[in-house]
Amino acid sequence: MSAMMTVTPGISVITEKVFPNPVYAYQRDGAAWADVSLEGSSAIVKGVKKLSGAPVMASDLRASAGLVLAGLAADGETEVNRIYHG
């Protein structure tokens, strides 16, 4: 859902109720790949017109799946690094 929200007009909020510290991996090299900010257990997602391909880093299984989906929607090439979840 977070991948879809990055390209949806307006502001969306995702609140994590299962895990205490949500991980949203829309970061690359310290710069935002999408407009996502964390506030407590919620992520505030501001939709952008389009995503551009970028090197990104996988952190956990859920975030990695979101990165792959966002990468498929992005213009250009997206490289997802550190995929070795067991």
Image (tube, rainbow, N blue to C red):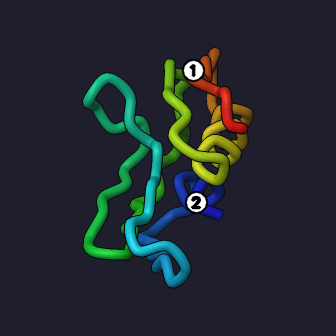
**Residue at (61% x, 18% y) in the render:** 79
- Front tag of 2 and 1: 1
Quick one: which residue is furthest to the front in this view? 86
Q: Secondary structure at mark 1?
A: strand
- Where is residue 53? Give x, y as percent: 56, 23
Relative to 57, say whether 22 is above or below: below
Task: Name the amino acid type tagged 1.
Answer: Asn
Q: Pointer 2: what residue?
A: 2
Q: Secondary structure at mark 2?
A: helix
**Residue at (51% x, 40% y) in the render:** 59
Going from N to C along the chain, the mark reached first, 2 or 1, is: 2
Quick one: which residue is furthest to the bottom in this view? 17
**Residue at (57% x, 20% y) in the render:** 81
Which quadrant would the C terminus be assigned to in this image? top right
Front residue of 37/61: it is 61
Mark carried by residue 81: 1
- Where is residue 21? Give x, y as percent: 38, 66
- Where is residue 44? Give x, y as percent: 37, 68
Relative to 22, say whether 15 is above or below: below
CA–CA distance between discs 2 and 1?
19 Å
